[in-house]
Image: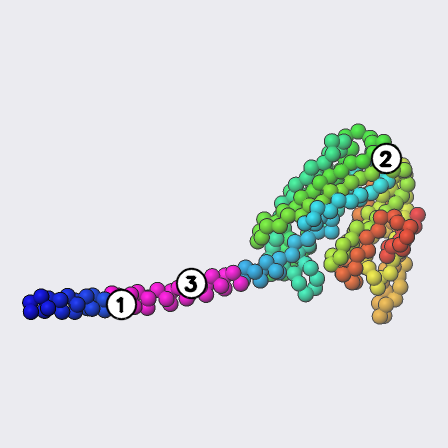
Amino acid sequence: MNRSRNRRRKRIKTKELNIIKILIILVILIFIIPRFISFAIYVYNFTYEHIISSQDFHFSSDKLTEDHLEYEVTNNWSGAETYTILINMSSKQNDMSYTEADIVYSISCTCSDNVTYTLSKTTGTIVGTKNNGDNLDAFTIDITPISPLSNNDEAWIEVTATSTAPYTKVLTGKMILGVGTSDISYEIIDAPNQPFLTVNIVNSTSIDTDVTLTYDPEVVLLDMTSRLYLNSTDSDTQQLNSYDYLNSITSSVSSLSTTSVKFYKIDVTQDYSYAGQNSITPVIQLHV
């Protein structure tokens, strides 16, 4: 009898202990589950905001790409004077998609052993719309031969632009300068979804020369702050929607120099690149 009573007491105590354990576990879960759910919601929101922010992060250039663009920027450089390369940076894909935050980036270069280079700056900031910026920035690189180069010689420079805030992205490009015959030539540097293009005019002669650029203002518009425009000696206009727009400009280009001028594109999706090919008619034409 005593043994039977003892067994019953043990079973009762075991049940009581199990009930207490279950109650303790339930109390712990009551405190843990809401916090776990809150943490899960926080992680989800943070991840979602990070993905959305990354999608609105645009860091691009007219000469540098993620795929390491390599191309000849000129084939008729005299090889004796300093050649200036203008590199435009942007945080804007189009009028509907742009980065609100400022993008801070660093710049580095390497070059062939027959030239030296000078950067206009080693860091830059593309001011975003959040700070009333235009999502644009630019820098220049001056390429100077160590000694005069011969006809058909080449020089090159590799450029890297790395965004450091708010996200990291690396753009690179290799630009090749070919030494050619002495004359006046030009090229148009452009890329799809860039708001502007750049015209580089190369005067490889030994005298200052007047050049005229003609274009359709329904396609491109001249940057009125450019040195070429400010030093212009003549111009023509055409009327559009009761307004007069420049469609021709004449200005002097110094001997043994490269002059760059910017044009804004009406249709930013277009690519008006031109490197002297005879098979296409450029949107901006040069006349000497």
Above or below: residue 141 compared with residue 2: above
**Which label is found at residue 152?**
2
Q: Are marks 2 and 1 in contact (CB under 8 Å)?
A: no
Mark 2 and 3 residues: CB-CB less than 8 Å, in contact?
Answer: no
Residue 217, image quadrant: bottom right
Amino acid type assigned to the residue bearing label 3 in the image: Phe
Q: Is residue 137 magenta?
A: no
Distance in Å between CA atoms under marks 2 and 1 = 87 Å
Residue type highlighted by circle 1: Ile
Q: Position of residue 50 (x, y in %)?
A: 54, 59
Point out the image quarter for the N terminus.
bottom left
What is the span of residues highlighted in magenta in the rendered image? Answer: 20-48
Magenta stretch secondary structure, dominant: helix
Q: Is residue 51 above or below residue 138?
A: below
Crowd class of label 3 (few under 14; some 14 to 19; many from 20; radius 10 Å): few
* Residue found at the far top of this picture: 147
Residue pointed to by mark 3? 39
**Residue at 64% of width from left, 48% of height from top?**
170
Numbered badge on residue 22: 1
Who's the residue at 38% across and 67% down the image?
34
Determine if residue 67 is in view: yes
Camera-side residue of 272 and 37? 37
Mark 2 or mark 1: which comes first in sequence? 1
Secondary structure under tag 1 reads helix
User: Looking at numbered disc 2 in the image, what kind of residue is underneath it?
Assistant: Asn
Question: Counting other residues with Cα less than 10 Å from the Cα at mark 2, is it few (<14), some (14-19), or many (20 or more)?
Answer: some
Pick whichever, 104 or 274, lies toward us: 274
Q: Residue at x 80, y 48 (%)?
A: 260
* Residue displayed at 41% across by 66% down: 37
Observer-nearest residue: 238 or 158? 158
